[in-house]
Structures are given as structure tokens and as C-alpha cells.
Amino acid sequence: MKKLLNTLYVTIPETYLSLDGENVVVLKEKQELGRIPMHNIERIMTFGYMGVSPALMGKCVELGIELVFMTPYGKFLARVEGGINGNVLLRREQFRIADDKNRSLAIARNMIIGKIYNSRQVILRVLRDHELRVDQALFRKKADFLQEALQKCKNVRDIDGLRGIEGECASVYFSIFDHMILQQKKEFYFSTRSKRPPLDNVNALLSFSYSLCTSMCTSALEAVGLDPYVGFMHTDRPGRRSLALDLVEEFRAWFCDRFVLMLINKRIISADDFEKREDGAVILNEKGRKEVLAAWQKRKNEVIKHPFLEEKIEWGMLPYVQALLLARYIRGDLDAYPVFMWK
């Protein structure tokens, strides 16, 4: 099993990264802020525009360390990587499935079932842990709706029908998301999902966590030899990591949404960690990004028991494990893709 190593997050926009021996050196205005040995790093994510030295890029490629460039606000820009992993036969089979509506539907259905199931589990978890603080009847009503939708997914006959069910379930789930926010209600409220750009603090956190998760899924898919740009649920579009977005669906509610709720309800993040731009977009400031990324790294190291493999793994390994299971299914080693469904 692949080992979970550390991710180096560089959140100061004015920093420049260079190489010194086997170390990443973080510089600001030519002054060294720190140096980190590369032997224990699997990914470097930099949230700035100053750049990285060619020598460090080459060393990352040599060592198989992923180098990801993000804007200071968490939007993906680019990745530096070495040779493509995996064999051509696996990818050709992936492409054949993507071109076959019925075979694509079989995988997409499982992924959306996982998304709806995990969304329902989040609702039930909040109801169980905070029974006296939430509207019990409302939460049970929404949970029952999602349970019925799971049955509809099993009988859906085309991808458009599946997308319709998924969209309706997302609307129902997010209709009570504000009720799951139990602290700092004045500063953190949710009325609707806004993406480009996020228009409030909660949406800013959701978008940031989804972006982090998508990056993890992209890396996981490439690590097992699949093409993250050719998906089964999300349509092909230049620059869109469609398969990575497919895989993220399984983790949105249980990993990302619960993470955001934890940040707010445990007061790890506050209103001072955000700024509002002239166009109305709300983004994390430098302090906020540091707080979120520290909590994200800590969450990645938590250990769970995988419901299908029945083995203990770190949270951060979940995208890799699911990508590996997807590759095994595409190769014909599994009868169906075992979507992640948290119990």
C-alpha cells in the first residue's frame, strides 16, 4: 500500500521556492524563511505567483513529488509532473468505457449513490450528535428523501436521469446545511451554493476544500494510471479534470462538508480569516488559509477503517484507494466499482 507522506503548503503569496541539495528553500525578498527536507514530501502546493526555480521543478520530477500551483484564493492554476504512470491498455479501456453510455452509467451511478448515501449520513450524524439543537422532523424528512433517491438511482436508465436525481438531492441536502452550522451564526450562514465566485464565508470554505480534494483525486488517478480528464459523469471539456470531479463526488459530504462544519463549529476559523473583494467574492486571507490547511493536514492523518477493504488507512489515502479500486474494475478484476460509503 502506498505510504501517506506530507504535503508542503506555501501560503505566503510573495515567496519563491528554490532547491538547495535535498531541501526545498522558501524565500521572500531573497531572505530565507525556511527549508524543508524533500525525502518526506509527496506534494508541494504553493498559493502565490512568484514561482519556483527550474532546479526545484526538475528535482520534484526526479523524486516523483507533485508540484501544484494555486492562486492565493485557492483556484487551481497548473501542475508539474514527470512521465505519465500506468499502461496504455488501462487508459484505452477507460476511454472505451467513457464512450459507452451504458458502461459509463454503471460507474457514474455507483459514484452518485455514494454521494447521496454519504450526504444522508452527514444529516443523520448531525441529528444524532445534536438532537436537541436541530429540527428533528426536518432532518428526518430530508434524510428520508435521500433514502428514496437511492432507490431511484438504482433504476435510472440514462446519465441525464442520474444527473437530475443528483441535482435534486444536492438541493435538498444544502437546504438544511445552514441548520448544521451551530456556532458563529452571525458570521457564518448558508442560503445557497455560490461557486464562481463564492459570495459568503461558508461558500468560500466549501470551494477551497473542494479544490484541495480535487487536487488529491487528480494525483490519485494519475498514480494508478488513469486519465483524470476523461470521466463518466462529468462531460468532457478542455481543461476539465472530469474523472477527478467524478471521484470527488464520493468525498464531498463526508470529507469536505464535515470538515467545513468542524472548522466553524469548533471555532477554528473566524470571520477575521476572510476578505471581500470588489466584485463581491469572499476569499480566505493568508491567516485563514494557514488555519484551514493546518486543520486539513491533521484531518488527512486520521485513521479510519475502509468499509470495502476492511483495512485501517489514513483519511488522506482515501482518494488513492478509490482510484486503485476503480482501476481494478476497469481492468476487469472486480465485478463492480465499490464506491466509498461511510458507515
Image (tube, rainbow, N blue to C red):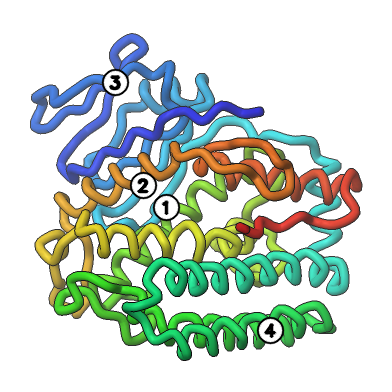
Q: Nearer the viewer, residue 129 or 7?
A: 129
Q: Quadrant of residue 132?
A: bottom left
Q: Position of residue 277 (x, y in %)?
A: 15, 72
Quadrant where the C terminus lies?
bottom right
Q: Are marks 2 and 1 in contact (CB under 8 Å)?
A: yes
Residue that badge 3 annotates: 36
Give the secondary structure at mark 2.
helix
Position of 55 with respect to 145 (left or right) is left
Can you give x and y, in whole percent of width and height, for residue 204 in the image? 29, 68
Sequence order check: which comes first, mark 4 or mark 3? 3
Looking at the rendered structure, which numbered label has been put on residue 149? 4
Give the residue type at disc 1.
Leu
Residue drawn at x 41%, y 42% as measured from the top left: 68
Type of amino acid under label 2: Trp
Q: Amino acid at mark 4?
A: Ala
Q: Which residue is mark 1?
A: 212
Residue holding disc 2: 296
Could you tell me which residue is drawn at 8 percent across and 32 percent down? 29
**Label number found at residue 335:** none
> Mark 1 or mark 2, which is nearer the start of the sequence?
1
